[in-house]
Image (cartoon, rainbow, N blue to C red):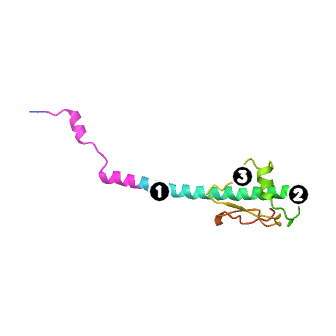
């Protein structure tokens, strides 16, 4: 009579994951990764938009401050206001740029009236909702 050792009996009764269970776990993980990827992309674009609007606001406020310091009136002709404000002054360490790749255009030739933006982004979604008080 041949007796089997007790360790071989235990080894044959082990439970393991089936192929369906492993596939299900991998599928759930891929779904979670996909949802996270989409959420991160939306978050990044929202942050880029907020940064762009913030830069437009900063340039607008700096322009108003500069015009008050130099006693320039709204509508007064001044063709080099952008150069004076962004390149020559100490308001900005470097020229602002849109983090999403938009291009800024500037109100040229005269000091803009209150409520008119001095700088705009080429991406339409980056336009501020309100410029009241700017």
Percent across and percent down for residue 51 are 67, 55
- Image quadrant of residue 116? bottom right
Which region is colored magenta? 3-27
Sequence-earlier tag: 3 or 2: 2
- Image quadrant of residue 67? bottom right
Rendered residue at 66%/63% (across/down): 126
In-image side of 10 versus 101 (left or right):
left
Residue highlighted by disc 2: 68
Relative depth, front residue between 4 and 57: 57
Rendered residue at 24%/42% (across/down): 13
Name the chief secondary structure element in magenta: helix
Q: Is residue 124 magenta?
A: no
Residue highlighted by disc 3: 95
Gap in Å between the C-alphas at discs 1 and 2? 52 Å
Helix, strand, or loop for circle 1?
Answer: helix
Question: Which mark, by number, is residue 34?
Answer: 1
Rendered residue at 80%/58% (across/down): 80
């Amino acid at each position: 009579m041949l007796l089997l050792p007790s360790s071989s009996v235990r080894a044959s009764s082990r439970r393991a994951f089936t192929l369906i269970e492993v596939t299900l776990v991998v599928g759930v993980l891929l779904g979670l990764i996909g949802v996270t990827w989409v959420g991160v992309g939306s978050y990044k674009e929202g942050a880029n938009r907020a940064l762009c609007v913030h830069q437009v606001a900063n340039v607008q406020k700096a322009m108003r401050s500069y015009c008050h310091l130099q006693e320039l009136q709204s509508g007064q002709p001044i063709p080099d206001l952008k150069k004076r404000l962004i390149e020559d002054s100490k308001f900005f360490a470097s020229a602002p740029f849109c983090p999403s790749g938009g291009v800024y255009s500037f109100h040229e030739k005269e000091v803009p009236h209150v409520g008119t933006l001095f700088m705009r982004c080429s991406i339409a979604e980056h336009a501020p909702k309100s410029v009241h008080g700017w």
